[in-house]
Image (cartoon, grey):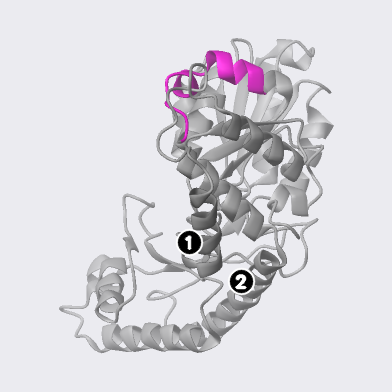
Amino acid sequence: MSSPLHAAIEKAILGHFLDKLSQTNLVLGSGGSRLTSGNCRPHVELEAEMKDYFRYPAALLCNSGFEANVSFFHSVPQSGDAVIFDEYLHASARDGMAASRANRALYPFTHNSVSSLRECIVNVLQRHPNIAAGKGTVYVGVESLYSMDGDFAPLPQIVQVVEELIPKGSAHIFVDEAHSTGIYERDGRGLVALLGLEDKVDTVLHTFGKARAAFGAALLTSHLIKTYIINYARPHIYTTSLPHADILALNTTFDYISSPAGAELRERLQRLSKYFSRRLTEALKQVPAELLALPVEVQHPGFPVGLASPMHPILTPAPVSLQNYLRKLGYSARAIPYPVVPKGQERMRVTVHARNSEKEVDEFIVHLLNWAKTMQAVSPATNEVQAKL
């Protein structure tokens, strides 16, 4: 996804970062893990700022989204608990589940299917009467925005089903905002905040390597969960804390993304994402769906009408051919073939950036159409599409 807000190369951010570096003696390294000499004042102060910024009781700074996911799902679910999760939830969360005390009570549901989630919850309550009696916890794990399909989780409906079926106090909703943090909500707090669900979602993961153009991650959660992870999550306990330079970078990018300049970038990204989607949908009417196609878009209840994702998967049976064609034109194109995705779902994923222009969008679509014409003109004997169908 890289940096959809283009923040990684914004000159204003770089300038502010260098100013902060020049004003401190703490730059390189951190000294150790958070439980030893690596729990420095800048780390603690940043957590306090993130707690207030994201409007959660506590924030726990982690070295990466992977570490945060593994730490939570490895340590928090206990024997007698169950974990329900979207089948497309990130691999790091699944790695954590596999090492947890609840690793024999893992229940995936069909991607973004509220009916499948409902069936899964009913099944879990039948198989785990202790949870139905309020003596265990069901953890429900989803992502707010899935990068491979560029689609949103139906968060309001998920919350509604969880509250309807699971005894009060026996559910814990976990939302990974890796791909939505920074680009949604007035100040970039993400999709959970945009939808007003902070008091319904128990733990939120925000990562900093994409829209926030830095490094690391944070778990926004309760004081109890934070304390438990600090003391029991091995990935967190035995990892050297973030270097001071990274803390300074995070302070810089947080300030910028929550500023009017960041709001302008978010607005521009939404406008360009909608423009690209509209123009591409119209252009692909000229191309056989067997060659280039777009997934069906779904408008979830409770979402702002027309909310756009910057990620646009383009389905094609010839992703490597399209990748090579686009690379020759100077694009940073990467095919997503089988087995990364199931057979028949091979694709090229396009990410719109806030500093792109409508002209650049139009030129890219023209190149797509030219590639499609070339593929259609190739004789059946050598046509990669025919060979794969």
- Whole-number angstrom distance, CA of label 2 to CA of label 1: 15 Å
In the image, which is nearer the foreground, mark 2 or mark 1?
1
Dot label at residue 269: 2
- Residues 217 and 351: in front is 217
Give the residue drawn at x 59%, y 10%. Answer: 79
Left or right side of 58 for 364: left
Which comes before the other along the chain, label 2 or label 1?
1
Q: Secondary structure at mark 1?
A: helix
* Corner quadrant of residue 261: bottom right
Q: Indicate the position of residue 244 as horizontal and vertical percent values.
A: 48, 38
What amino acid is at disc 1? Ala
The reply to whether the magenta stretch includes residue 229 is yes
User: Compared to 386, does 59 lie above or below?
Assistant: above
User: Compared to 115, does 84 lie above or below?
Assistant: above
Left or right side of 186 for 241: left
Q: Secondary structure at mark 2?
A: helix
- Residue range in magenta is 226-242
The kind of secondary structure the magenta stretch mainly shows is: helix
Q: Indicate the position of residue 368 as horizontal and vertical percent values.
A: 38, 82
Q: Indicate the position of residue 126 as horizontal and vertical percent values.
A: 70, 19
Dot label at residue 370: none
The reply to whether the magenta stretch includes residue 82 is no
Q: Kindly identify which residue carries mark 1.
A: 8
